Structures are given as C-alpha cells and as structure tokens.
C-alpha cells in the first residue's frame, strides 16, 4: 500500500477571517456532518519582563512539521469518528490579535468533535516542531516557550 503524502498546512502570515469562513462554508454540502468544532489560536500581547509582545515570527522545518501534522491527523481519524478535519498554521510574522492556528473538525455527532479537537490541539502543542520568536515593541525578540 502506498503511503499518503502529508499536505502542507502552512499559511504565510496570519490566517484571515475570510480564509476561515470560506473553509467553513465549503462544508455545507456535506450533509452527513452534524457538528463542527473550531479552534483558533491567536497571538497574545503578553507582557514579558516589562516588554509587550507585538508579534510572533513562526518558523519550522516544513517537511518535518508537515509529517507530524499528518501523523496527528491520522491518529485523530483512528481514534474518533470524524467526517473531516483540517489544520492550518501560520508561517512568518503574525501580529498580536491575529490568528496563527486554525483547526477544524467535523463529525456526525457533537461530543466527538469536542473530544477530538482537544486531542488534536494538545498533540500539536506537544509534538509539532514549530518555533515562535516573540517580537517586542522595542524591536528585541526571544524564542517563545510553550506552556
């Protein structure tokens, strides 16, 4: 059996509201779906050591990161009764208040999408090698630590 190729989940810059709404609208023709659940990760304007974060500059080794996203996707489909699932992550600079992660899960039943989405987002945070450099208002920066 031929191994499926992982798809590129990266979007350059912030994930726009139009991109999100278009993704949702495309699912209206799938009448076997009874529930959707969406996670939107947004860049926070945290204050760290007296300086405010104005943006995060995301980087990754795309081939390795896309493979990890693919593995998470496959585990989610094995574990949950999902109809479809999409993951998009920003690459490059994303300003505070903008969306950097969009996860969209669909299933015939609502309880499934709640459980699946938590599993997917936690796996992304734990397993995917995406790096964020916090950019501060004084133009200094530091690597972000996931919490």
Image (cartoon, rainbow, N blue to C red):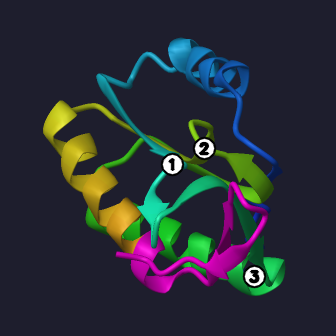
**Residues marked 2 and 1 touching at CB (< 8 Å):** yes
Instruction: Identify the disc placed on residue 103.
Output: none
- Residue at 80% across, 84% down: 61
Q: Is residue 15 magenta?
A: no
Position above or below: 119 against 22: below
Instruction: Give the Cα separation between the discs numbered 3 and 1.
Output: 45 Å
- Name the mark on residue 45: 1
Q: Is label 1 in a helix, a strand or a loop?
A: loop
* Rendered view: 96 above or below 17: below
Q: Quadrant of the C terminus?
A: bottom left
Work out which residue is located at the far left of the displayed protein and give it.
Answer: 111
Q: Which residues are magenta?
A: 124-147
Which image quadrant is residue 106 in? Answer: top left
**Residue 79 in picture, x, y percent from top left:** 28, 67
Q: How many marks?
A: 3
Q: Is residue 96 above or below residue 23?
A: below
Give the alpha-carbon distance from disc 2 to disc 1, as whole Å: 5 Å
Task: Please give the residue where the numbered disc 3 appears in the rendered image.
Answer: 2
What SS does tag 2 mark? loop
Q: Is residue 128 magenta?
A: yes
């Amino acid at each position: 059996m031929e191994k499926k190729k992982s798809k590129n989940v990266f979007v350059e810059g912030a994930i726009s509201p139009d991109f999100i709404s278009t993704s949702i609208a495309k699912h209206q023709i799938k009448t076997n779906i009874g529930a959707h659940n969406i996670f939107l990760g947004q860049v926070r304007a945290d204050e760290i050591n007296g300086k405010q974060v104005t943006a995060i500059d995301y980087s990754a080794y795309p081939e390795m990161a896309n493979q990890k996203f693919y593995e998470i996707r496959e585990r989610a489909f094995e574990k949950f009764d999902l109809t479809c699932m999409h993951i998009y992550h920003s690459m490059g600079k994303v300003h505070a208040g903008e969306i950097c992660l969009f996860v969209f899960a669909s299933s015939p039943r609502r309880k499934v999408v709640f459980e699946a989405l938590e599993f997917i987002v936690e796996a992304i945070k734990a397993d995917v090698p995406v790096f964020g450099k916090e950019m501060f208002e004084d133009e200094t920066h530091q690597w972000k630590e996931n919490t």
